[in-house]
């Protein structure tokens, strides 16, 4: 069986990494694919580093172990970049997508990540401009969507609408959708 | 037409409970089950079910309320985990002794100490002698499917016993996966209307539940309870087949994976079976004749099916996610090994403990267990019956 596409999300408790991972799962469901989305759970800790994971495949997913060698790493909080675990297990041909105000080349230098692809987007600024506060998970889904041919932008947007449909006011949902599309446009890629 | 949704195990079971629409649910929240009961409470508050939802002050009270409601003649469900199950202890035995068809979802979680909220099977394995039927689920889909089947099995007049449907805490309960759900009407028709037997609320036919029962009859009553649970196996098989006709997903007491021509196999419970399939496929690619026996039904223990599946093999690795301290091996090992004592041929069996307190298990660990088992068989002698996977020594 072909190895599924595996994604690891890094953020801090309360920033919405688990929600982002679930929205991605919903978008993959809409693609008719098999998927898993699961958090790395400890005690609930606001502000502490947390991880979430996605698997995507065209075949049924059977394994229930953790993701150790992700193809894509998404970092939604730039203050986590100093952690060694950010690059842990990331394939040298892999992709790292980071909420970062500088260029992908600067980030590459900073991380010492030579291979693969580096994607940066200033998601904090985008969300500050659109939402009036720094809630970056939908922006980061947009940046990820740019390098994720498995999932269409339409399905990502639809998954955001569905996730927030009953929880947020329509205008806030629209702003989140705008964050997603804007981050997708603005994301810079260094191959 | 089946609908596909993204559910974690908790959501899948809560949704099954909504479709079952039981008369009474009494539950107390405990990690990692909380999400399931919260969702069901939402269904209650939104008026989507007719259930009487009883909030209680402890799991002991939850099970007590379930027993009262079931004896009164209601269709009753609950959910718990770990220490919550432990607090239900004495009431578990009473539910089974009264032959009350209560269905309970358990998210398997380690029993302290030290404090741990993650998956192992210590909780339900500790309750294995309480007289309940135990069905394990490999993924969220099976947790959903097993919950619906459990109603029909428990309420069958040849059974009338309580059932625990388990799923691995966090690994399944909190992982969102693809789940195919049935239509409400399909579930309703499959389980049928419930009719309590000898209900307390039938005032024209008064009955007594739980009277004192000393050396004059207690033993005979236990003897009939032994027979009752032993007789469940054909019902579990029949309901699994009927569910297959409805959903396309057939269920048996146990499931063999690539066992037909296998020489070595792992025996496991729950989510590990999925991970094991990856290990089996990988070893098969290297030319190894290996397979998996997934135990879906642990109580009653399907002895004859186990003998039939495992007897032809050369070696078996039994994976236990809980310990029976001071015993010779874990709960699954002792059952499998004991069943094979009368088998026409007896494979070598090694017990591997793994995954306590949520320690992850990977396909490579399971491959290692199978390779070690093969080495032992080739060496012709078992030096070490008990081994460990994923442990630092």
Image: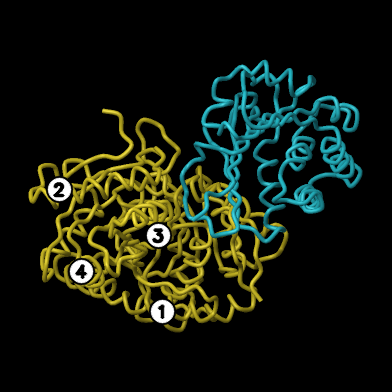
Chain colours: A cyan, B yellow
Number of numbered discs overlaid on the protein picture: 4
Q: Secondary structure at mark 3?
A: strand
Which dot, 4 or 2, sits closer to the camera? Answer: 2
Front residue of B275 and B163:
B275
Q: Quadrant of residue B119?
A: top left
Instruction: Answer above or below: position of B19 versus B37.
Output: below
Nearer the N terminus, badge 2 or badge 3?
A: 3
Task: For marks 2 and 3, give the CA distance.
Answer: 29 Å
In which quadrant will I find the N terminus of chain B? Answer: bottom right
Mark 1 or mark 2: which is in front?
2
Tag 2 or tag 4, which sits nearer the N-term? 4
Q: Can you identify the residue that label 3 sits on?
A: B136
Q: Position of residue B41 (x, y in %)?
A: 63, 55
Q: Is residue B45 left or right of residue B74?
A: right
Q: Is residue A190 above or below residue B174?
A: above
Q: Which mark is residue B156?
A: 1
Left or right of residue B59, residue B331 in this image: left
Judging depth in this view, the residue of B343 and B13 nearest the camera is: B343
Question: Image height check: is B345 above or below A107?
Answer: below
Q: Which residue is mark 2?
A: B376
Q: Which residue is mark 4?
A: B307
The lab-note entry on whether marks 4 and 2 share a chain reads: yes
């Amino acid at each position: 069986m072909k190895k599924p596409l595996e994604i690891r999300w890094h953020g801090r408790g309360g920033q919405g990494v688990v929600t982002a991972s679930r929205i991605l799962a919903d978008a993959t469901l809409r693609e008719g694919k098999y998927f898993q989305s699961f958090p790395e759970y400890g005690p609930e800790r606001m502000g502490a580093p947390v991880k979430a994971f996605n698997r995507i495949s065209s075949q049924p997913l059977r394994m229930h172990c953790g993701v150790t060698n992700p193809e894509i790493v998404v970092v939604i909080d730039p203050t986590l970049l100093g952690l060694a675990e950010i690059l842990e297990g990331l394939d040298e041909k892999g992709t790292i997508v980071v909420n970062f105000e500088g260029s992908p080349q600067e980030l590459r230098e900073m991380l010492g990540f030579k291979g693969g692809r580096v994607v940066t987007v200033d998601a904090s600024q985008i969300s500050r401009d659109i939402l009036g506060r720094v809630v970056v998970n939908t922006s980061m889904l947009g940046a990820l969507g740019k390098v994720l041919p498995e999932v269409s932008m339409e399905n990502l947007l639809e998954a955001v609408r569905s996730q927030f449909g009953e929880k947020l006011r329509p205008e806030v949902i629209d702003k989140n959708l705008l964050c997603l599309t804007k981050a997708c446009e603005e994301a810079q890629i260094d191959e | 037409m089946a609908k596909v949704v993204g559910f974690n195990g908790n959501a899948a079971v809560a949704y099954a409970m909504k479709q079952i629409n039981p008369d009474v649910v009494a539950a107390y929240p405990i990690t990692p089950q909380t999400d399931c009961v919260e969702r069901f409470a939402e269904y209650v508050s939104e008026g989507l079910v007719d259930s009487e939802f009883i909030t209680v002050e402890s799991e002991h009270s939850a099970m007590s309320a379930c027993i009262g409601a079931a004896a009164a003649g209601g269709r009753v469900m609950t959910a718990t985990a770990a220490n919550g199950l432990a607090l239900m202890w004495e009431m578990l035995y009473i539910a089974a002794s009264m032959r009350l068809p209560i269905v309970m979802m358990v998210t398997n979680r380690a029993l302290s100490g030290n404090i741990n909220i993650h998956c192992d099977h210590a909780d339900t394995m500790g309750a294995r002698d309480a007289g309940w039927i135990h069905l394990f689920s490999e993924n969220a889909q099976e947790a959903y499917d097993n919950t619906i089947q459990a109603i029909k099995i428990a309420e069958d007049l040849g059974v009338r016993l309580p059932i625990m449907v388990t799923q691995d805490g966090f690994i399944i309960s909190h992982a969102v996966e693809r789940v195919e759900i049935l239509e409400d009407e399909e579930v309703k028709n499959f389980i049928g209307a419930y009719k309590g037997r000898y209900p307390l609320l039938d005032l024209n036919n008064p009955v007594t539940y739980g009277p004192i029962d000393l050396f004059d009859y207690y033993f005979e009553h236990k003897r009939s309870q032994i027979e009752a649970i032993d007789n469940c196996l054909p019902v579990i098989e029949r309901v699994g087949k009927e569910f297959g006709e409805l959903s396309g997903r057939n269920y048996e007491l146990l499931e063999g994976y690539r066992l037909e021509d296998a020489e070595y196999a792992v025996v496991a419970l729950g989510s590990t079976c999925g991970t094991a399939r990856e290990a089996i496929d990988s070893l098969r690619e290297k030319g190894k004749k290996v397979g998996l026996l997934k135990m879906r039904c642990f109580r009653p223990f399907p002895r004859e099916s186990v003998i039939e599946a495992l007897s032809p093999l050369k070696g078996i690795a039994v994976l236990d996610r809980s310990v029976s301290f001071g015993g010779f091996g874990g709960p699954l090992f002792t059952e499998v090994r004991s069943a094979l004592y009368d088998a026409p041929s007896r494979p070598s069996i090694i017990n591997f403990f793994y995954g306590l307190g949520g320690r992850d298990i990977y396909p490579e660990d399971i491959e290692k267990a199978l390779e070690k088992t093969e080495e032992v068989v080739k060496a012709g002698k078992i030096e070490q019956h008990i081994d460990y996977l994923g442990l630092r020594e």
